[in-house]
Image (spheres, grey):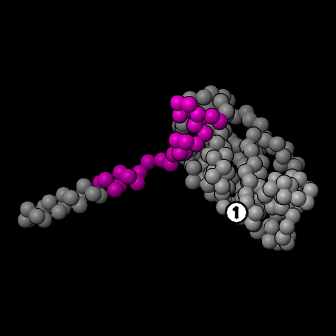
Amino acid sequence: MTRTRRLWLVALALGLVVSLGACGGKKRIPASAGAGAGGTPTMPSDVPSGTSGGADVERLGTETTDSTTFPVSDPETGEGGPLADIHFEFDQSALTDEAKGILEKHAVWLQGHRDAKVTVEGHCDERGTVEYNLALGERRAIAARDYLVSLGVATGRLRPSSFGKEKPLDPASNEAAWAKNRRAHFAVSR
């Protein structure tokens, strides 16, 4: 074998090793996700210490709590619960930067509460047909779910659902009310 060919094979093997190393590893929540001073999560002190990333998301902080006890949403209405709503622009299902920041905090919380299951409810304002808003609500719920999954939350823990315009948070017919109603709500259960 010629020297040039050997060098080429060594370079190819080295490139393969480097590229495989870059593809490996677990998904990580971005360092900025919920990070406060010193890089520790600003999300509640509800992330138990000593848990590993496992099949869900990787550990970030050293907070302590009992991961089996957490507030859940009202089973009848889906209201309440520990996860804040995110909001959307008019006629959009794309996540805003603000919504992504909130979802990153949700991923940290879900990491510490592995028994939690979430119904991601998509909601719309009153404008548009029932059918159109049900489809838009579904796209919103799926966008939120998919972003949480991209942060490492197990897909099986998240169920998208759409209410369209049927369950407004604010029944008024003005821009302020419509902005409140364009949301994804997170109903938490065990």
Residue 152 percent location from the top left of the image? 57, 49
Query: Closest to the observer: 145 or 174?
Result: 174
Q: Quadrant of the N terminus?
A: bottom left
User: Is 3 placed left or right of 173 in the picture?
Assistant: left
| Identity of the residue drawn at 35% across and 51% down | 21
| Identity of the residue drawn at 86% across and 55% down | 177
Main SS of the magenta part reads loop
Q: Quadrant of residue 163?
A: bottom right
Q: Quadrant of the C terminus?
A: top right
Say if residue 74 shows up in the picture. yes
Tell me the amino acid under the disc marked 1.
Ser
| Identity of the residue drawn at 87% across and 64% down | 126
User: Is 177 placed left or right of 82 in the picture?
Assistant: right
User: Is 156 placed left or right of 32 in the picture?
Assistant: right
- Per the image, label 1 sits on a secondary structure element best described as loop
Up-down relation of residue 74 to residue 165 (above or below):
above
User: Is 155 placed left or right of 117 in the picture?
Assistant: left
Query: Closest to the observer: 113 or 143?
Result: 143
Give the mark count. Answer: 1
Q: Which residue is mark 1?
A: 93
Query: Closest to the observer: 54 or 153?
Result: 153
Residue 34 percent location from the top left of the image? 61, 39
Magenta highlight on residue 128? no
- What span is colored magenta in the figure? 17-43
Query: Closest to the observer: 171 or 106?
Result: 171
Residue 61 percent location from the top left of the image? 55, 32
| Identity of the residue drawn at 13% across and 61% down | 6
Up-down relation of residue 183 to residue 134 (above or below):
above
Q: Residue furthest front?
A: 175
Magenta highlight on residue 28? yes
